Each structure stands twice: as structure tokens, then as C-alpha cells.
Image (cartoon, rainbow, N blue to C red):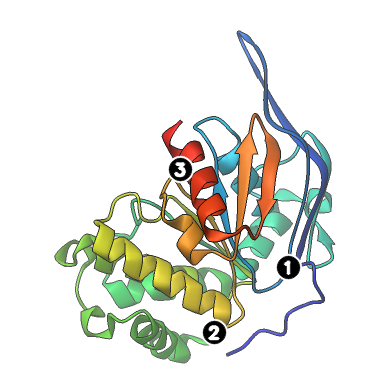
Amino acid sequence: MHRSLPPSPLFELRRVSRHYETPSGTVRALDGLDCTIHAGEFVGIIGRSGSGKSTLLNVLTGIDHPTSGNVRVAGTELQRLSEGELARWRGRNVGVVFQFFQLLPTLTVAENVALPMDFCGTYPPRLRRTRALELLERVGIADQADKLPLALSGGQQQRAAIARALANNPLLLVADEPTGNLDSHTAQAVWDLFASLSAEGTTVVVVTHDPGVARWTRRVIRLEDGRIVSDGHLAGLQTQEIVQEAVHA
């Protein structure tokens, strides 16, 4: 099933700040950030620890609320939604991939993939397993559908997690360090999968320390102290230098 995408840009952040009060003072996780992301883009977000990467991801997905500024997604202003409305919006529009997979160990792989459909009621019950099997085929592990997650390798579990994130045909697929727990060969396969999903129209945003990110994403955003210090489609060597600086600093 293909979702009709709204006119670009899909995401608009205007003067977005997120501040936290701590005993030692105010932490400015995001500081007056402006950013747009268009439908079908594949974006890598890089930066040192504490630069605001995960906070930006949380604001994009409505998990966290900005202290100030405006977040608009497909015409919806997230700050105007109640917590219940946000949860429903997120369930239908956002797929999340975690570094440590977060698959439920007592459910089969297919049942894990079907779970978001159960929660949101996006597919009739009789179609959910079929949808789950189609997604597992899409990520290359349909033969693992009836196994429990712990019977799978790390790479297979991450593929299952990606299939689950796609269950409700989301507008946005976000991933927080999705290859941090994988060997280099398996990580490359995951990056290839994200790239192919983006080519098919899914908007993919990945927070990562992986220095190979610039080989796969169409765009790299670098954060520093809650602000965007570079953003764009840079030539190969220059992009690699910026990424290396950000992930090894």
C-alpha cells in the first residue's frame, strides 16, 4: 500500500528550542533551530554526544515538546495536539527503529511486526499477518517469521525491527543509532535497506555515529550545541571529513 504524500516540505521546524533545567543550570538541547525535511528524503543527523541529536529526533516525532518554536508535520502543528492525539498521530505516522531492537521476546517475529497494526487498528485483523509477512519478505527475513526474536542474529532482529516500524505505512521512519550494535557487513545491509526505502518514497531520518553515513544518506545535518552547523548535500570527500570530525571528536 502506498501512502499519498503531502506537498513538500513534510517537516518544518521554526525557531525550535528545547531547554532543560538541571541543578547546575539550564541545558539548551536545541537552541533556535530551523529545519525543513521533504517527503522521501534520507537524512543523517550527526554530532558529538550532547549536541542535540536525540532531542531533535524526539521533537520531530512528538515524543518531546519544544520549549518554544513551532513543529509542523504534513500541515499538523504538533504542539496543538493533546497527549492522546499525539499518541494516535505518532502510531499512524511514525515508525521508530532502536539500536537494541526492542522486540518482545515472547512474541514471534511476525507477531512483533503485527503489533503496531493491533494497537492502531490500521489493518483488519484477518489481514495483519499477511501484511507482516509481506514486510518481512521486504526486509529479507520472511523465513524467520514464526521464530522468537532470540533465535535470530542481531542483523535479523534489526531487520525485523525495521519491518515493525513500517507496519502502519508511516510518513516518517526514524532510527536512533540503528547500526551501533551490528558488525560492518550487517550494518551496510541495513544502510542499503534504508536507502531503498527512501527511494520508494519513505522519509528516513537517522541519528548515528557511523562514519559511513555520508555514503548512504542524501543529506547530512551536523549539530553542535543544539544548533545546525552544516546541512546539505556535500561532495564525497568534504562530507566524509565533516562526518569523521563529528563522530570522532
Q: Earlier in the sequence, mark 2 or mark 3?
A: 2
Q: Which residue is labeled 1 in the image?
A: 38
Q: Can residue 92 be spotted in the picture?
A: yes
13 horizontally vs 212: left or right: right
Q: Can residue 105 be spotted in the picture?
A: no
Q: Earlier in the sequence, mark 2 or mark 1?
A: 1
Badge 1 marks a residue whose secondary structure is: loop
Hey, what amino acid is under mark 2? Tyr
Image: 149 above or below 132: above
Mark 2 burial class by Cα count in 10 Å: few <14, some 14-19, many 20+? some
Spot the residue most to the top: 24
Mark 3 burial class by Cα count in 10 Å: few <14, some 14-19, many 20+? some
Residue 58 x %, y %: 61, 46
Q: Which residue is labeled 2 in the image?
A: 123
Q: Earlier in the sequence, mark 1 or mark 3?
A: 1
Badge 3 marks a residue whose secondary structure is: helix
Q: How many marks?
A: 3
Residue 182 x %, y %: 27, 55
Mark whose residue sits in front, 2 or 3 = 3
Residue 195 x %, y %: 49, 73
- Contact (Cβ within 8 Å) of mark 1 with mark 3: no
Label placed on residue 244: 3
